[in-house]
Amino acid sequence: MKAYKRLTAPLSGIAFAALAFAAHVHAHDAGQEKVTVLEAHPMLNAPGKKAMTLSVDYAPGQASIAHSHSGSAIAYVLEGAVVSRVNDGKAQTYTAGQTWYEPAGSRHYESRNASATQPAKLLVFILLDDDADILEPLPQ
């Protein structure tokens, strides 16, 4: 039982911090996408790292702010279509069932719903440092 308590305490702290960050982002800008932390786990085989699974919901026409991730991320389109432009690449449109990868430190200049009339939804897996935020806004 002692080992169980040791594992759940950091997990609940990670999940709380991630939810607080997501709530903080959306409290200031109601026009931003909805980010939901589905799971957060410390990586026991990689001390100092955490793995998170997120859902990102875009209303019609909605977009993310330009940002970077300190960790590596894989995005999977669950619904609709999303336009994404990472680093110096061209903007690409991904539809339901398609994925893309963002290496740690990538600059995500564009991430938006491709439709002005239909919602879009992503499932994102990200691996990052324990104390890292999900994203960091890029300077304007």
Image (spheres, helix red, strand yellow):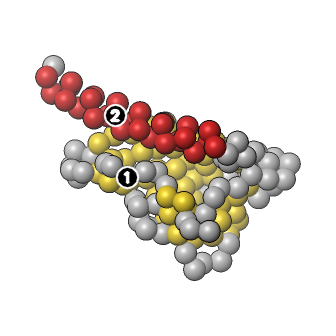
Q: Which residue is mark 2?
A: 13
Residue at coordinates 63% horizontally, 43% vertically from top-left? 28
- Residue 128 quadrant: bottom left
Point out the image quarter for the C terminus: bottom right
Residue 87 at x, y percent in the picture: 55, 75
Of mark 2 and mark 1, the one earlier in the sequence is 2
Residue 44: name its quadrant: top left
Query: 44 or 105, which lies in front?
Result: 105
According to the image, label 1 marks what residue? 132
Res. 115 visible in picture: yes
**Distance CA(mark 2)–CA(mark 1):** 13 Å
Question: 10 Å neighbourhood of mark 1: few (<14), some, or many (≥20)?
Answer: some
Quick check: 77 above or below 18? Answer: below
Residue 137 percent coordinates (x, y): 54, 60
Residue type at mark 1 is Ala
- Give the residue at the far bottom of this rendering: 88
Amino acid type at mark 2: Gly
113 up-or-down from 36: above or below: below
Instruction: Determine which of the numbered discs, if any, sits on residue 64 in the image.
Output: none
The residue at the point 67 percent across, 52 percent down is: 96
Tell me the quarter of the image containing the N terminus: top left
Residue at 57% x, 53% y is 76
Q: What x and y, as percent, mark residue 7?
A: 23, 32
Query: Height in image: 101 above or below 51?
Result: below
Q: Secondary structure at mark 2?
A: helix
